[in-house]
Amino acid sequence: MKAIRVREFGPPEVMRLEEVPDLVAGAGEVVVRVSAVGVNPVDTYIRAGIYMPDLKFPYTPGIDAAGVITAAGPDVKHRQVGQRVYVAWSISGTYAEEVLCKEFQTYPLPEGVSFGQGAAIGVPYGAAFRALFQRAHALPGETVLVHGASGGVGIAAVQLARAAGLTVIGTAGSEEGMSLVLSQGAHHVLNHHAPGYLGELSDLTCGKGLDVIVEMLANVNLDKDLEAVAVNGRIVVIGSRGRVEIDPRKAMGKEAHILGMTLFNASEKEQAGMHAAFGAGLANGTLRPIVRSEIPLGEAAAAHHAVMEKSTLGKIVLVP
């Protein structure tokens, strides 16, 4: 079979499509024929050596995928050959024609949900769910601001928050992005390129401020978030591309919480809980990933360049 292989850390071009041996399912494992692969910013950080610097070469990148189970090893009891699944984490890496997984690294993909959409679930929806419910403990009736709501994680956060009964305010940087955010369930949307756009939040929250802020670019927004957050409000940092200076007194007066988040820290129980929620949302239609573009697997380098663009709307997937 063919797979993307990385033999050294570096720019996207270090990824090469190579012929590799077919995969064999061991005890408690399944092989999935991949129909779509999710491309995430974290994939680029790993490839560049920023995360997991002790990773052994060569390796196949990728965390998310979707496809059909083609083989099941001994002791597999809850998955079967021919079943449609999405993949969140794997043994072998997902940028490939096939992927080897532990049984419970795969999750049933309902009919009516495309493989491209399935490949857009694991990291984006996992990060959004962890931020909203496992870190911020968001509750129905609260108001949440989702920065960068037109990207993969942002769209997931909007859908999850709306389905849970929160009032959702999103931001985007273009008319197209703002329309997309509204179509995904946000009650209000702001243009984050407009000067003083956060000033609109006082009217939108009746002067109370935001209960939860989902922050995708903390190095730009964090100090301003502390002005917009409510008393006892929670700011969850999902993304940052540099250092930031804040005034701690803004946090003191409101007893605000600044919470870090990484999906890598989720326990098995927490992962099981989030994927149970995703399964329900996919089945009842409240969760529907948005796929922006499909790129051939052999053009993984182009996908890594594209996923880091600020104008990304929805999800990029690779197609073997």
Image (cartoon, helix red, strand yellow):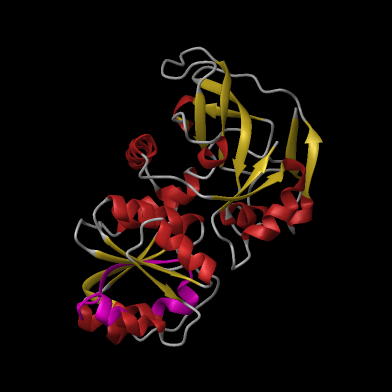
Q: Nearer the viewer, residue 288 or 16?
A: 288
The location of residue 58, given as percent across then percent down, is: 73, 41
Q: Residue furthest top?
A: 74
Q: Residue at x 27, y 76 (%)?
A: 204
How many discs mark residues in the rendered view?
Answer: 0
Identify whether 319 is placed above or below 218. Answer: above
Magenta segment range?
201-222
Where residue 225 sits, quadrant-wise, is: bottom left
**Is residue 85 inside the magenta stretch?**
no
Q: Residue at x 51, y 60 (%)?
A: 151
Q: Nearer the viewer, residue 76 or 313?
A: 313
**Is residue 216 inside the magenta stretch?**
yes
The location of residue 240, given as percent across then percent down, is: 50, 69
Q: Nearer the viewer, residue 215 or 23?
A: 215
Identify whether 295 is placed above or below 146. Answer: above
The location of residue 163, given as percent across then percent down, is: 29, 50
Is residue 303 visible to us here? yes
Compared across the picture, whether 116 is left or right of 75 comes to right
Is residue 251 visible to us here? no
The location of residue 131, given as percent across then percent down, is: 36, 57
Position of the C terminus, as image quadrant, is top right
Where residue 274 sits, quadrant-wise, is: top left
Position of the N terminus, as image quadrant, is top right
Q: Residue at x 45, y 59 (%)?
A: 154
